[in-house]
Amino acid sequence: MYTFVATIAKIILRLFGKIEVRNKELLPTEGGYIIACNHRGWVEIIVLGTKSPKPVHFMAKKELFTKRLIGWFLTSIKAFPVNRENPSPGSIKKPVKLLKEGHVVGIFPSGTRTAEDASLKRGAVTIANLAKMPIVPAIYEGPGTLKGLWKTRKATLTFGEPFYVSSKNKDELAAFTERLSRSTNEINYLNKAQ
């Protein structure tokens, strides 16, 4: 089902506009890794899923899976539910397992509130640390809807340098969380300078 949905998504994106992908060569060619991308709407999920050389397993809030059509779509693009309101140790088992099996996990560590943003970044760093797999920071620049993409006809997906997380305590974990924030800010700055 993933291949079918991905093919349809590629056709839709081709019709709706041009997506420029920068630094794709930075993506690891072997093993699992996390892509930590900013989150504005549905479009970056489709863009990331179609522009990644490997299928991406997305973390999505569990409430989305209760809606029949959205739940079907998320399941067909290999998304899995997480409880963002009450995260438990069990919520990180699935992404860690996927990473260790060599899969790509997509995490959107940017929420609507600063506290949520920091918490989601910390979650991405914690998962990378437990799985011993790298994080690839990414920035999507463009509209958050297909209608917006149709109007502007362009968007950009930029990947940053992958990095490993090796943390034994909360302070080290906080430093890697800050590194993820700096990496995404640098990508953003370089994109605006071009």
Image: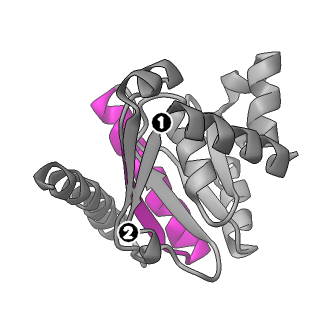
Considering only vertical position in the picture, is 191 above or below 43? below
Identify the colour scheme used: one colour
Which region shows up in magenta?
A: 113-140
Label 1: few (<14), some (14–19) or many (≥20) C-alpha neighbours in 10 Å: some
| Furthest-left residue in this view | 193
Q: Could you say which is closer to the camera, residue 179 or residue 53?
A: 53
- The residue that disc 2 covers is 23
Question: What percent of the width, then of the height, locates residue 153?
Answer: 40, 32
Residue in view at x 80 percent, y 19 percent: 69
On whether residue 119 falls in the magenta region, the answer is yes
Does the magenta portion include 115?
yes
Residue 148 vertical position relative to residue 98 in the rendered view, above or below? above
Q: Which mark is drawn over residue 47?
A: none
In the rendered image, residue 83, in percent from the top left (x then y), is placed at 64, 34
Secondary structure predominantly adopted by residues drawn in magenta: helix
- Under mark 1, the amino acid is Gly
Indicate the position of residue 64 as horizontal and vertical percent values. 68, 24
Determine whether the residue tagged by mark 2 lies in a helix, strand or loop. loop
The residue under label 1 is 17
Q: Quadrant of the N terminus?
A: top right
Residue projecting furthest to the front: 15
Q: Which amino acid does label 2 sit on?
A: Asn
